[in-house]
Image: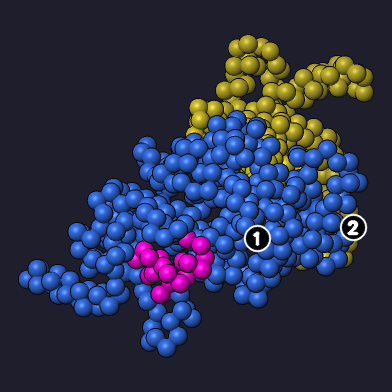
Amino acid sequence: MWKFTLRRILIMIPQLFVLSVLIFLLAKAMPGDALTGAMQANPNVSPQVLAEQREKLGLNDPAWQQYGRWVGNLVQGDLGKSYVHKIGVADLIGSRLANTFYLGVAILVLTYLISIPLGILSGRYQNSLLDKTITGYTYLSFATPLFIFALLILFVFGFQLGWFPTSGSVDVGIDPGSGSYYANKFYHLILPAIAGALVSTTATIQYLRNEVIDTRLKDFVKTARSKGVPESKVYSKHILRNSLLPIAAFLGYDLTGVLAGNLFIESIFGYPGLGQLFLQSITQRDYSVVTILVMLSGLLALIGTLLSDIILSWVDPRIRIG
Amino acid sequence: MNTESVLEIRDLTVAFRIKDEYYPAVDQLNLTINKNEVLAIVGESGCGKSALALSLTRLHDSKNTRIEGELLFKGQDLNTLSPGQMNKIRGSEIGMIFQDPLTALNPLMTIGKQIEENLDYHTSLSRKEKTKRVIELLENVNIVDPKRVYAQYPHELSGGMRQRIMIAIAIACRPSLIIADEPTTALDVTIQSQILDLLKQLQAENDAGIVLITHDLGVVAEMADRVVVMYAGEIVEIADVNELFNNPKHPYTRSLLASMPGANVGQESLHVIEGRVPSLQNIPRGSCRFSERIPWIPQTHHAEHPELNEVAPQHWVRCTCYQNFHFEDEVGDGKEIVLNGIAGTQ
């Protein structure tokens, strides 16, 4: 088990290397650099100064030199500095990470709280009115683009009804660390979390429904019934556990995904997390931030697969790793 | 032999729903299973054996299945019991063994827990007593090192061992009736005979009646006391095992026996029954259902409404066509029919 984990972590090193080259090339392929856009359009900044700055920042060096410098710094823990925010990328990400984490956890918990019962009910009472209603909901949420759905929720509950705040993660002027501060943060979280969860439940509900329908017909379920196990126990003890296996296989991704940030939700709800930062950084050509954020989500995906494998081997005795 | 009955099946019809219509897979079946007897039910795939077996404990999906008739188990009609009452009988009074031991056990549960589950619902033993009983059961079914197997998962065991586990589950509460639905079909020959020996030995210890569903006549010869031959949802012949093998009457029984390897040593090739078992929607109901597959027998030889007739003590045969059935006729007449067919198309 530990050997397996260690081996997997070692394999991540070349994977991360390839990822870093790709990210660097893609970032370079984007039109413009940190000094284009607002800087270039500003009449108070002479083209000469811009050229000097480019030279000073090493933006005119050959690509491989720039890459070497970037990776060299990364390895030493220097994530670079944001051109736009004028602070270190590590500090910048750190300041947003907590918000993203809260939102991610809220969405994840809500997603499972909604989708697991619905998926099971839908599968167990296949073709009933209940199943058709639930399936209808999943089709609807699958077909509706997230941003339209989120905007609708924001419009109705935020603007029309005024029940929830429409942007930010906390109101201004509340003493950080106090009880009301956290209550206020939670209040800000509700709407984006519900919007995110209602859409992300789709896949899990559908998966679980199909698994329950499949598992229900397995021979061991017949065996359980032939033992005189009551129907409710047949579901809770035999069908459910076996149906949850594929869901468990995705849990690793979901857990690490909590830190990756939710692009649409954060942008639409003006929620200051990593997703929003990512989108802003792209439009502002804030390379150092964009590259690090992509690297981060790549790393999280790799750890996610490892976690998934470990979780699966833990819940399914047929899978033993090592 | 003790002839006290365990289960009396009266006018049992098991119908499955296909596109809003119900088609009987088991039709008006009457049968008695006695204590301490092995009753074999034989027939090709699709003749209603398994449909019958599952209906005895009402394990069919109730939404798409209709079970009519009486299932008198120790005087109590199982067909009128509530699901809760039925659960009390399943696993305690009636044990079941299924065909494929590789898929019949829950892959996520230890062997011990799966056997114990049976005791959970039917006994009030303490935890310790249950564990003890499970170990005892594992010993009964000849599992070596039962303590180790108790904590193992199904995938760690071989097919033969898993079938032993299934048997242990079936006999955990000392049932008076065991329904074994092709218990050896998925096993290789040496393991088959071990499992059959085990079943016999356990039956002798418990006085249980066994319903043995199989299409393997070798298994029948080894195990059964009485044999029921089924075709297209009906019983076509019932007899004691010796009577049936020595004096088969119904054309279907005789065809089955003739197509068994070893029964025709010295013959050039095995007998092949023409055609196949009709599908549920196409069963020729109300006439001799086997007539389609012995086309050289003229319709006049079949009874109009074939019933089971007692041709010898405790030997019942359906229809009258057996009286004029000879294998030799098939060759000539069969060819003739083919030729006629070709001539007709010209």
Colour blue maps to chain? B
Question: What residue type is disc 1 on?
Answer: Pro
Q: Which mark is residue B25?
A: none
Q: Residue at x 7, y 71 (%)?
A: B346
Q: Residues within 10 Å of mark 1 (few under 14, many from 20)?
A: many
Q: Residue at x 79, y 48 (%)?
A: B116
Looking at the image, residue B319 sits to the left or right of residue A58; the answer is left
* Label 1 secondary element: loop
Bounds of the magenta segment: B238-259
Colour yellow maps to chain? A
Whole-number angstrom distance, CA of label 1 to CA of label 2: 58 Å
Farthest-out residue, top: A161
Seen in the picture, residue B98 relative to A125 is either above or below; the reply is below
Where is residue A192? Give x, y as percent: 69, 27
Quadrant where the image shows the N terminus of chain A? bottom right
Q: Chain of mark 2?
A: A
Q: Nearer the viewer, residue B320 or B180?
A: B320
Where is residue A209? Give x, y as percent: 59, 40
Q: Which mark is residue A76?
A: 2
Seen in the picture, residue B195 relative to B33 is either above or below; the reply is below
Where is residue A188? Give x, y as percent: 75, 22
Magenta residue check for B279: no
Question: What residue type is disc 2 on?
Answer: Gln
Residue denoted by label 1: B101
Q: Residue at x 55, y 31 (%)?
A: B80
Q: Chain of mark 1?
A: B
Res. A165 in view: yes
Res. A20 in view: no
